[in-house]
Image: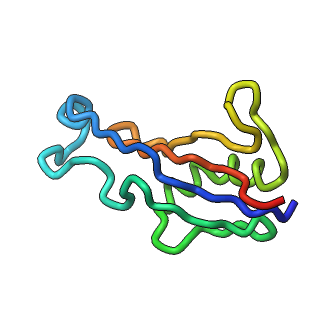
């Protein structure tokens, strides 16, 4: 273990129909206010900790992938490149997708 990795925000979505049907205050809903496309975070694989200003819920959702990749996991042939994966938070009305990739051996 101990390899560094990078988390990059690559996509944001908002499902207005789901918000209207299920959220109690859908008029204030919209895409995720925490992240912007292109935000990136470098993580030390020795002791991976939630980055500052990173959504706690998103971190809980993607931590296992971060931990696996920093440990050398690869998901080929599903992904075009070794030691990377696209993963998202579990917010069903406004999910954010992240690219998690190994950046140092």
Does residue 2 lie above or below 73 as drawn? below
- Taking the spot 51% from the left edge, 42% from the top edge, the residue there is 88
The quadrant holding residue 60 is bottom right
Where residue 6 appears, x then y in whole percent?
A: 63, 59
Q: Farthest residue to the left: give it.
A: 27
38 or 93, which lies in front?
38
- Taking the spot 45% from the left edge, 61% from the top edge, the residue there is 39
Where residue 61 appears, x then y in whole percent?
A: 57, 48
Q: Tell me: 31 left or right of 87.
A: left
- Taking the spot 72% from the left edge, 58% from the top edge, the residue there is 103
Where residue 38 appears, x then y in whole percent?
A: 43, 56
51 or 10, which lies in front?
10
Where residue 90 appears, x then y in whole percent?
A: 48, 42
Colour scheme of the picture: rainbow
Q: Tell me: 49 left or right of 37.
A: right
101 or 26, which lies in front?
101
Q: Farthest residue to the bottom: give it.
A: 52
Quadrant assignment for the N terminus: bottom right
- Taking the spot 68% from the left edge, 31% from the top edge, the residue there is 80
Q: Tell me: 85 left or right of 51.
A: right
Does residue 79 lie above or below 89 as drawn? above
Quadrant assignment for the C terminus: bottom right
Q: Farthest residue to the top: give it.
A: 77
| Number of marks | 0
77 or 33, which lies in front?
77
């Amino acid at each position: 273990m101990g390899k560094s990795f990078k988390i990059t925000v690559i996509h944001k979505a908002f499902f207005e129909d789901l918000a209207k049907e299920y959220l109690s205050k859908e008029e204030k809903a919209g895409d995720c206010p925490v992240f912007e496309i292109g935000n990136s975070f470098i993580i030390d694989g020795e002791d991976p900790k939630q980055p500052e200003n990173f959504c706690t819920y998103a971190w809980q959702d993607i931590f296992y992938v971060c931990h696996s990749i920093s440990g050398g996991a690869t998901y080929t042939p599903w992904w075009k490149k070794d030691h990377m994966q696209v993963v998202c938070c579990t917010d069903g009305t406004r999910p954010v997708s992240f690219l998690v990739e190994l950046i140092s051996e």
